[in-house]
Amino acid sequence: MNRIKWMALAALVVLAGLALTAYGAASWDWFGRARGAGAIEGASIPAAAVTARGQSQGAAAAALGADGDDRVLFGDLHVHTTYSTDAFMWALPILGGEGVYPLADACDFARYCSGLDFWAATDHAEAMTPSRWLQTRESIRQCNAISGDVQSPDVVAFVGFEWTQVGRTPSDHYGHKNVIFPGIEDEAISRRAIAAAGVASQTLRGSPAVLNRWLPFLDWRNRQDYFDFQHYVREIQSVPECAADVPSNQLPANCFEAAATPRDLVERLDAQGLDYLLIPHGTSWGFYTPPGTTFDKQLEATQRPERQTLIEVASGHGSSEEFRNWREITLAADGQSGECPPPTRDYEPACWRAGEIIRTRCLASGANAETCEARAADTRLRAANLGVAYHLLIDGEQPTDWLDSGQCRDCFLPPFSHRPRTSVQYGLAISNFDNPSTPRRFRWGFIGSSDNHRARPGTGYKPYDRMRQTEAAGASSDEWRTRILGPQAQPSDEPNAGVTRDTLLTRAGFQLTEVERQASFWTTGALAAVHTQGRTRAQIYEALQRREVYATSGPRIMLWFDIVNAPGGSAAPMGSEVRMGAAPRFRVRAAGDFKQAPGCPDFTAQGMSAQRLAHLCGGECYNPTSERLRITRIEVVRIRPQNRPNEDVSGLIEDVWRTLPCDDAGQGCVVEFSDPEFARAQRDTVYYVRAVQEPTPRINGAGLRPTRDAQGNATAVDPCWGDWRTPRSDNCLANVEERAWASPIYVNSTRR
């Protein structure tokens, strides 16, 4: 019997060896399969429900004295599915995911869960194979095909992609931008989703294994998900590179096309004769933006700033709106090397905190104060020159060791490691003087989006289910955390000598970033709102083109912002650019979002199965009552763009310039203001407003939840972890004042 057992065991070992050999010979995805776009289940929303939306908006407009034909539609122009690599990774069971988030889910979610008027699919171009690009277009067409009346569709879906550029240093970083196309037929859409050359593409196309190959065997019950992910990566790597010296319109459809800079991206899109929107987003998100990066180089004519007509002010990654005068590092004249500035009451640079961690350890080891200060100074300098990888310098570091360093302490829902000189306000304040008589400036309209990676457009309607409605993800146990991040190094009282700028530049980009503290900054999505005369695709796109749009942090706040004495005696809406010499006068109308009822509207049960509704919506949908939240005030921001080279922008951004109380009895308010200083100043001026709503709970509304001393310094933090350390049932709620940002009105002086 023993001999038989040993023979059987030997046979199993041989079979296992053969299986593994075959698996390895097939590039470790032998059992993998392609994940498709899925099947859309939901039917069109009843026409009566769509009509009721318009009537409630019309009533709000009438109550505020606005044009009764003016409609406000809400949408989300930044949505990822499992076709995006990071979305697929976060969907894996080791990170608490559900295995797949196909494009069809996004259509059903927008229609039934979030109740949007429009949305766009914007998966990362770096992972978009010809097959996936074809399936994306077909799925979007299917979503539109069941939208009911073409003159009043229940939802409009757009095709787009994300150009995910990441630079390792401030000089070569341009950031992420979405490309949105107006039509859904092939001739109106790029033949390929154009990727960002550099780190993002190299990480995917050049790495033999993006994920640990042994994961299927470590989590055998969920093995298919890991096999499928490896197959997904191999599909990307199998697509041949496009010829770099051939114009985009002459390339075959089945190659991998990349653009290194915004200029290259614009040239490739223009070569195809396309109409499109090019929208920067997450601009101040420090997860991937090197410290010291500014918007200035993107105002050079070669980078085609005039094509970037909209900007995403806020998303589920945080708000990129606000400028602050502190610096994360101080760049040297070469624009590459840096030094670490000392902390202020409002901000502690992460490089400074790195020095303090080493100092504390050094003193605890018994070394004298002089030695420890020298080590701290050396650590600060080295950390300032490691970009987003500063944390790798400290062996055995824990996320809580960093306290709230690198974070904006007084910004509204800031992104992780906010970069003020790539903020929206900074971008509006700077000028390029290559032609001194006509300074070049950004002329953005404002939108918000979700940047959701779970095929869920418009997640900001209710603060529930943090692990599905935000980007929070993490290991299910300490054991899995070690498997994902690697074994923890032993703490040292000296910085790691092997971590240098030169060695880090050889590594893949996203392996360098600080990950775990970021979970405290993931929140639900923002929205884009458009002013139109109807619900058609063309009307929505035209509103986006003319910048008659605004952003909200998630609620469906109603907002109008007009200059009432524009040239010719007429009024001009948000997004307008006018030239005048007299004092401009403005009118703002605003009304809060409807309070939400629990659950979902009755019609949802008629259009989808109970099982799919539960899977997508989790039992909660956008479900407005008839009662509105109140707008508490209108804040006016005034920005006077630079009118000479190197003019200090800190004195040009006035936030808040004026605060106007909103006497809101439940239907909103109307306020007016003017700027008598405009005529005397004789300089171009940018004005925009924020409508601020009464406080309501928000997921991760308090960020790292720091404890502070009497001087305002953080002494401890209580992060909202994305892993097992924070229970899934804990939504980490805190009250915030949700808001809407009107697109600016650009008032140029006739006397300049």
Image: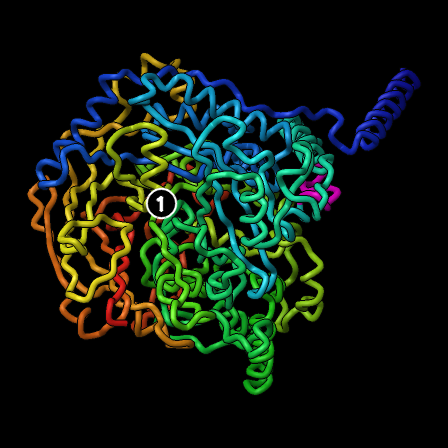
Q: In which quarter of the image is residue 554?
A: top left
- Closer to the camera, 6 or 749? 749
Where is residue 26? Give x, y as percent.
80, 29
The residue that label 1 is drawn on is 448
Name the residue at the bottom extreme.
370
Image coloring type = rainbow
- Closer to the camera, 654 or 393? 654
Vertical order, 614 against 537 (above or below): above
Where is residue 464? Give x, y as percent.
34, 36
Q: Residue at x 16, y 29 (%)?
A: 56
Q: Name the amino acid, label 1.
A: Gly
Q: Residue at x 57, y 63 (%)?
A: 391
Where is residue 201? Give x, y as percent.
65, 46
Residue 482 shows up from this direction: no
Answer left or right for 94 relative to 737.
right
- Closer to the camera, 273 or 124? 273
Q: Is the magenta stretch mostly helix, strand or loop?
A: loop
Answer left or right for 213 relative to 580.
right
Range drawn in magenta: 204-215
Tell me the SS state at disc 1: strand
Vertical order, 693 against 13 (above or below): below
Residue 464 shows up from this direction: yes
In the rendered image, residue 502 lying in the magenta stretch gets the answer no
> Which quarter shows the C terminus?
bottom left
User: In this figure, what is the number of numbered marks?
Assistant: 1
Where is residue 48? Give x, y as percent.
22, 17
Answer left or right for 255 relative to 408.
right
Query: Which class describes the residues within 10 Å of circle 1: few (<14), some (14-19), or many (20+)?
Result: many
- Closer to the camera, 155 or 450? 155
> Which quarter shows the N terminus?
top right
Q: In which quarter of the image is residue 535?
A: top left
